[in-house]
Image: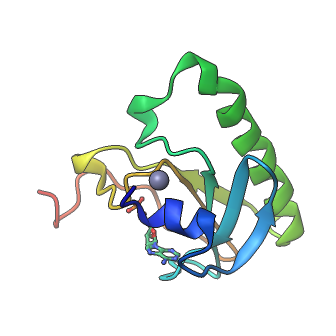
Amino acid sequence: MDCLFCKIVEGSIPSQKVFENERILVFRDIQPAAPVHVLIIPKKHIASMNEVQEEDLPLIAEMHQVAQQVAKDLGVNESGYRLINNCGPDSGQAVHHIHYHLLGGAKLGALTGISDSHA
Ligand code: AMP
Ligand code: ZN
């Protein structure tokens, strides 16, 4: 399958891994938007939040558990962090393999709605 994150999972594209188990991989974003910026993905290919099936719900729950653990490991659990999922064109989702961005390590800007680039 021609999916960037599936290639990262299989190892044909390198990544800076920060956590891995049988079901989930966490690696550093190549264009960090904050001092801590990692991507939490399932190893299973799910294109976006819209494609999550009932059978996937334990996996999605585990991604949150992993987020909690990784935030602690990277030292931002107490200073705070943000978990973001982009889904679909208006969100700017660029990679069609579901992922959460975990951002922290600095005071983050307010969440915006309509941006100039989207307006
Ligand atoms: P999104 O816009 O939510 O689909 O986010 C995709 C993210 O993947 C962006 O923040 C990119 O910087 C990141 N990204 C793209 N290619 C790579 C890569 N090879 N390794 C790590 N992160 C990547
Ligand atoms: Zn994929």
Apparent side of residue 63 relative to residue 73 in the rendered image (left or right):
left
**Quarter placement of the C terminus:** bottom left
The foreground one among 108 and 62 is: 62
- Asked whether residue 118 appears in the rendered view, the answer is yes
Q: Quadrant of residue 17?
A: bottom right
Q: Is residue 86 above or below residue 18?
A: above
The colour style of the image is rainbow
Q: Quick check: which quadrant has ligand 1?
A: bottom left
Apparent side of residue 95 relative to residue 43 in the rendered image (left or right):
left
- Asked whether residue 38 appears in the rendered view, the answer is no
- Residue at the image point whose x is 51% and y is 59% from the top: 6
- Residue at the image point whose x is 55% and y is 76% from the top: 12
Apparent side of residue 9 relative to residue 70 in the rendered image (left or right):
left
Q: What is the x, y in percent for residue 31?
A: 47, 82
Q: Number of labelled discs?
A: 0
Residue ranking furthest to the top: 54
Q: What is the x, y in percent for residue 104?
A: 66, 69
Q: What is the x, y in percent for residue 37?
A: 61, 72
The foreground one among 2 and 97 is: 2
Q: Quadrant of residue 14?
A: bottom right
- Residue at the image point whose x is 61% and y is 65% from the top: 10
- Residue at the image point whose x is 23% and y is 48% from the top: 90
Q: Quadrant of residue 2?
A: bottom left
Apparent side of residue 90 relative to residue 42 in the rendered image (left or right):
left
Q: What is the x, y in percent for residue 1?
A: 40, 55
